[in-house]
Amino acid sequence: MTLDQILPPERTLYGVPGGSKKRVLEFFSTFIAQNIPSLDSQEVFSRLIGRERLGSTGIGHGVAVPHARSPHCKTPIAAFLKLGDPIDFDAIDGEPIDLLFVLLVPEEADDTHLTLLGQVAELLNSPTNRSALRQADSQRALYDVLTSAIAELPAR
Amino acid sequence: MVENLNYYFLLAGMLIALSVLASRVSARLGTPLLLLFLGLGMLAGEDGVLGIQFDDASTAYLIGNLALALILLDGGLRTRLSTFRAGLRPALCLATFGVFITSGLVGLLAMWLFDLTLIEGLLVGAIVGSTDAAAVFSLLGGQSVHLNERVGATLEIESGTNDPMAIFLTITLAEILTGQLTGVAAGVVSFLLQFGVGAGMGLAGGWLISRLMRYLDLAPGLYSLLALALGLSLFATTNEMGGSGFLAIYLCGLMIGNHPGRHLEHILPVHDGLAHLSQIVLFLMLGLLVSPSTMLHFALPAAALSFALILVVRPLAVIICLKPFFRFRWRELWFISWVGLRGAVPIVLAIFPVITGVENAAVYFNVAFFVVIISLLVQGSSLAPMARRLKVIVPPGAQPSRRNLLGIMPVNDYEMLVYRVDNTALEGVALRMLRFPSGAKVGALFRSKVLIHPKGSTCLHQQDVLCVVGRSCDVPSLNRMFNGESLQHEQRAFFGTFTLEGGASMQDIADVYGLTLSQGEQQLTIGEFITRRVGGVPVVGDDVDWHGIHWVVNEVAGNRITKVGLRLH
């Protein structure tokens, strides 16, 4: 399972309204529940917020990777959000974030969960990838940058 | 004598100057510095180029005692009391029982190798029984190896505190051999006196001296002189009272060094230099004292003894002292074993039998010579690679390249902290956009050595040098801000990308990542879980492998874990 298989173009969002950590996660939950009808927006939201309570998923350099398991999720789901304005996310370096990679996985997918998380981390720990994503000026460009960066990840 | 005065001065001056210059070479080559001093001494010595005859044991002993006292004073000054949390108990175990075990086993071996009596053999063991603080830290510091706190503190405190034990054993055994000491009772009394009086005088004297230093307002250069003078007086008084002067002067340094104040800034660099000078002098003297032509006779058995000490005896002593009582991991134990570096102390102690007129004094001296030289060669030159191999290092974060107290407050003073911008994320960022800790301000900005007046709108560029005024509590967040990219990469590879709060409950974590908990784990927080796994005293860099994830301790406050990294695979 690779990241590009679970991240279709329609789940790459450009210029998402910011506001606050809670608002952005709410926005995502509503969006994903519309995109995949089997998911319940309240449930996704509370799972993501629950993970944030254990420690922020803001991994530094303006990037956050909210992630959770969901019982209604049949297969891993990824989404990428680029915010219009950076928001405070209690990130490890204290910097506000503007890039979010959200990952939802089925309850039983433990190993896949960790493997996918590792890939996301690798993708966004690269300064080149981050600056390319920030320079993308449309939804299409953002998706192209993402897919080519994912394709360049070392094979597992 | 008077007409030769200038000749002696020239000789001493040149030898020391050469030794200092040699330290540059040593830093580049990575060979242990002390061996170079030794080599210089031998070159100048009786079989060397200059052919200097030096065999005055009592002068050598005088110089040795003084040098050792200075080294221990500096060791105490540099030991931070905060490291006692993780290292005190294991270090004291090693410094007492460890020295006993090492001396005993080496003694038995020496008895067999050199055909000595039991007491004579044990004397050899006692002479080489203690590890060397100064040698350990000049080697580790020179190679910028950042050890994890548990290992670092244990080694540091051990090497500072084990010398009095070895000195006591040596003196006692030498006295038995010369018939000055008879009976077990006298031995026990002497032991209690040495340690009781030594510890009492050191702590009390150190407390008084540190209070005095803070109260006095002296010219900057005089603080270190006063510390030196009072330290030596304390050393001598304690010795006269029958206590261990070496223990006293180490504790005295510890008390002075941990009593905050402006004077410390003036004391530390001077004593650092003095400790260096003492080492140079000691090793030069050793080089002068040995006669290579006679020591070849001892080469083979002494080498065998050295390797046995390094490969068998020291690991055995470390394992016996630490494994049953403390939760060290095996690789930490191996590393502690490997840093059983012998240095200045055996040299001084080896002169002692010569002074007291023990028979076969040449044996002790030459054996000590070989043990020290082989230990420095084998262990000293491989410390850094060994630390990396055994994974006892923690990736260092950014540090201010320079810090100076400003002298505004008597305690918790403001400091000038100098940072160099080495992070593309800061390129073109205006100063007002930086998230400075509220107490800190940018005082000056240098670009290509030109002073720029810093304004809120001033944008940073790579290699800019910033002078920040702040307090020591601001340093961690400033360090994070100016962390260079390569350092960040190293840290992320070590601590993992994701970070959890130490107070997060295990049950919640298990729910998020689909992990199964066993009985009793549900009620714990992740911090408590790791603390239990590592034996109660967590340090940054501790990791626990659990369900295919490495849980790495990222931040601690006292004995409580506050941040845990998740390293995936």
Image (tube, coloured by chain):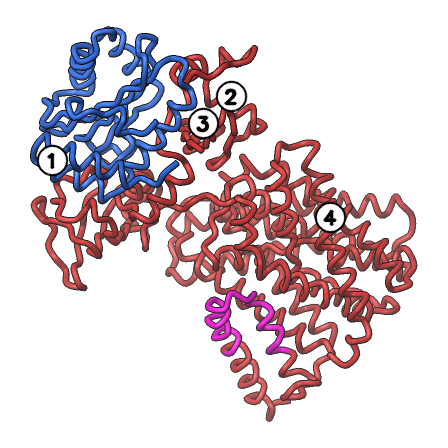
Chain colours: A blue, B red
Q: Which mark is residue B529?
A: 2
Residue with the most extreme bottom position: B3
Is A47 above or below relative to B210?
above
How far apart marks 4 and 2 lie (CA) works out to 34 Å
Q: Chain letter of disc 3? A: B
In the image, taking residue B291 as reference, residue A32 lies left or right, namely left
Drawn side of residue B547 relative to residue B251, left or right: left
Q: Which mark is residue B99?
A: 4
Q: Which mark is residue A141?
A: 1
Answer whether labels 1 and 4 touch (C-beta < 8 Å): no
Numbered label tally = 4
- Magenta region includes residue A10: no
Q: Label 3 near label 4: C-beta < 8 Å?
A: no
- Determine the secondary structure under disc 2: helix
Which stretch appears magenta?
A: B18-41
Alpha carbon separation for disc pair 1 and 4:
68 Å
Q: Amino acid at mark 4?
A: Val
**Label 4 crowd bin: few (<14), some (14–19), many (20+), radius 10 Å:** many
For the residues beneath circles 3 and 1, the answer to whether they share a chain is no
The numbered mark 1 sits on a residue in which chain? A
Query: Does B551 sit above or below residue B121?
Result: above
Q: Same chain, marks 1 and 4?
A: no
As shown in the figure, which amino acid type bears the numbered disc 2? Phe
**Which of disc 2 and disc 3 is earlier in sequence?**
2
Amino acid type at mark 3? Ile
Residue nearer the viewer, B155 or B176: B155
Check chain identity for marks 4 and 2: say if they share one.
Answer: yes
Judge whether residue B207 can be spotted in this image: no
Residue placed under numbered mark 3 in the picture: B561
Q: Does the residue at mark 4 contact the one at mark 2 (Cβ under 8 Å)?
A: no
